[in-house]
Image (cartoon, rainbow, N blue to C red):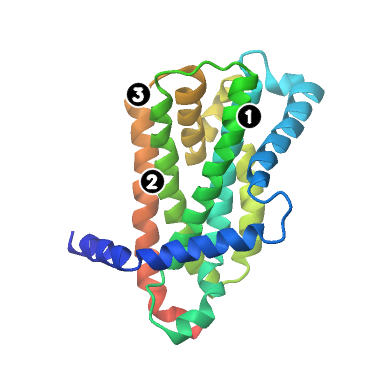
Amino acid sequence: MAKGILYLKDFWRYRYLLYNLISRDFKLKYRRSILGVLWSVLNPLLMMLVMWAVFGGLFPQVRGQGIDNFPMFLLCGQLLFNFFREATTLAMSSVLQSAPLLRKVYIPKYIFPLEKVCFGFVNCCFSFIALVLVMICTRCPVHLTLPMALYPLLTLFVFSLGVGLVLATLTVFFRDVIHMWEVFTTALMYFSAIFYDPIQMEGWVQSFIKFNPMYWYITGFRRAVIYGVGFNGNMIAMCGGCAVLALGFGLFVFKKNQDKFVLYL
């Protein structure tokens, strides 16, 4: 409890630094870009169209017959998975990239992975404009459960932060983690039920997919946005439990090793 209070005090003390770092990354990403922030809307739309053409047209058997509003189904999964991949990938290299600053002034090292995850979340929020456009074009009804979509989204933020802290720690000591994580997230995408419904799979495959936390976040988000279905206790427990466990483990690993970072940067 006391350690949690100390973390909150540190976070509040460095809130302006966090804001400035997010603002800097945002400006750097869209500097000299003609489309600018608009690309955050166009990118998920274009990717959705490509996946729709591939899985809905060339391979209709993958799409199956039980998925209503396939474009919305695709986009919901794509937006949440892209946020997780971007947030964790950026957080993974955050401590390495901040090495010159860390050698000059004292800054809590966890600020840098946290800032990258927050930056990924900001980009994700802009991408939700694409979700609104697809909802309008496909005439997807607006359900009363729509505000409930915040729960899987926010717990995914916490989960991504926990994973990002672990990756940031490992990357300081083992640079190969950067390449391995790219391969891992590619494989993870195919087991996150982005372009298919696990109900269409065989029994053991369904069970295997449910071991993937991303499945629960994506499914929960879809239930609230597309189907207007509330969360049962299992859904709430899995989304919240995975987030708390990931953050707790991430803080433990990061805090235990952060004093050694300076020897490897």
Q: Which residue is drawn at 67% across and 61% down?
A: 31
Q: The residue tagged with tag 3: helix, strand or loop?
A: loop
Quarter where residue 19 is shown: bottom left
In the rendered image, is residue 265 in sight?
no
- The residue type indicated by label 2 comes to Ala
Quarter where residue 130 is shown: top right
Which residue is disc 2 drawn over?
Answer: 243
Q: Where is residue 3 in the image (x, y as percent from the top left)?
A: 22, 64
Q: Residue at x 43, y 60 (%)?
A: 114
Single out the mark in the foreground, 2 or 1. 1
Which residue is disc 1 drawn over?
Answer: 74
Q: Which residue occupies the foreground of this view, 9 or 201? A: 9
Mark closer to the chain start, 3 or 2: 3
- 148 lies left or right of 76: left
Mark number displayed over residue 232: 3
> Alpha-carbon neighbours of circle 1 within 10 Å: few (<14), some, or many (≥20)?
many
Mark number displayed over residue 121: none
Q: Extreme right residue here? A: 58
Q: The residue tagged with tag 1: helix, strand or loop?
A: helix
